Image: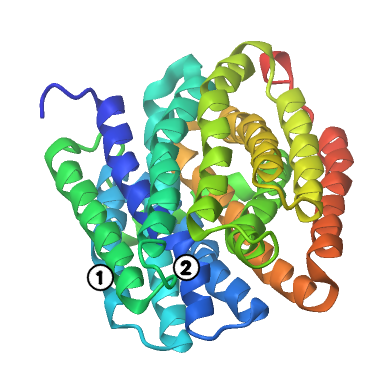
Amino acid sequence: MKFLTPFTALCTVGFFAKFSYALARSPVLPLFALYLGAGSEAIGFAVGISTVTGIFFKMPAGALSDVIGRKRTMLIGLVVFAVMPFAYLFIDNYQALVVIRFFHGLATAIYGPVSMAVVADVAGGRKGELLSWFSSVTIIGNLLGAPLGGLILNSGSEGPTLASFQAAYLVSGFAGLMALTLAIGVLKGDGQQEKHNSLRGAFTRFLSGIKEVVSDKRVVITSSMEGLQNMTVGALEAFLPIYAVTVANLSAFQAGLLWGVQVVATILSKPIMGRRSDTSGRKPLITIGLLLCAISFAAIPVLKDFYLLAMAAMVFGLGEALVTSSSAALIIDLCKEKNFGAAMGTFGTIFDVGHAAGPILAGLLIAQLGYQYSFWIMALILLAAIPLFITNVAVHGKEG
């Protein structure tokens, strides 16, 4: 596959990996948990548990990639993408679903931060633009995976069946195998690998990279902003399909399409906003994005019409694009190149704290307060974080 440039190869592999994971997640996962008899709290936990994996493994995976090589570490994550979807075929109870979801989370925990560090290595002064292009291309997998999952579940006249859930996970598994196969062919060489005279030297380098990154307040707070924004993303992944089907009386396909609308808005906006952040500054874009996400998230539980819900999802996707196109690039701006893996691992860990907390918190709140007040509380949390970001992240030049 010599016709692929390194950046194009990363995008191609990322597309299939993301497609595989998205098809296994929303709306298939929450509806599968519902099929297995789970309540709202349990559904939220099942959706969030795979992200908990990222909390424990993303930072170590990113730092490890700085030591043993980023492409080699990426391949480990891609093996998980290829293998784990087939494990869902043997699930017949909620407890087994939770276990499989935890281990499936290793895929993105290992692959996610390391792939971003590799892009940062080749991006030069176009970090915001290329990170955004990479994210947009791979997010196309989300665009296709979520509605296709809903379409597979909607294929029967009596709603989702065990056979339809298994069919969805088979497609997910084949997509994961495609990502791994392509990666083996195109990801060769590893210029980021460092040489160490001993295991102790490698371990010291591993710890020092993490220490340098997490001691920077600006990195932690900027990561936290995307983590909080991702809290609302996680809540929508878990409960927008349930809300659409059980409250708004939409079909499973329409529920998946709502997620697709959000993803389209993100894909179309992100490269433009990434280039803008390279030239005009990242901090204002993050602030505006947080505002748009909070407003649109609060609007969703008062809407039942498909087109109005789609409009709210589109605005949310635009806000997500503003935040994500600038936050990772800003963190890279603040870190040394040798620590890009650790920086993206730290970013990914905090990102996943939000993603895991979103469905779990939403499930607990919805069980007690219903959709409207639960979504409003989470939107207020997002709004309250904006002053913290503005006053504590001081940047200079075009990054400001």
Residue 191: x %, y % from top left: 26, 33
Residue drawn at point x = 68 percent, y = 12 percent = 280
Residue drawn at point x = 39 percent, y = 57 percent = 149
Q: Residues within 10 Å of mark 1 (few under 14, many from 20)?
A: some
Above or below 277: residue 219? below
Find residue 235 and report its image quarter. bottom right
Mark 1 touches mark 2? (CB < 8 Å)? no
Q: Quadrant for the N terminus, please.
A: top left
Q: Which residue is mark 1?
A: 86
Q: Which residue is mark 2?
A: 29
Residue 123 vs residue 187: left or right?
right
Above or below 32: residue 293? above
User: Element under label 1?
Assistant: helix
Residue 80: x %, y % from top left: 29, 62
Q: Residues within 10 Å of mark 2 (few under 14, many from 20)?
A: many
Residue drawn at point x = 72 percent, y = 67 percent = 362
Three-letter amino acid code of the residue under disc 2: Leu
Residue 146 vs residue 385: left or right?
left
Find residue 357 and report its image quarter. bottom right
Q: Nearer the viewer, mark 1 or mark 2?
A: 2
Residue 302 vs residue 25: left or right?
right
Residue farthest toward the top in the current orientation of the protein? 279
Residue farthest toward the front in the current orientation of the protein? 157
Residue drawn at point x = 72 percent, y = 69 percent = 361
Q: Earlier in the sequence, mark 1 or mark 2?
A: 2
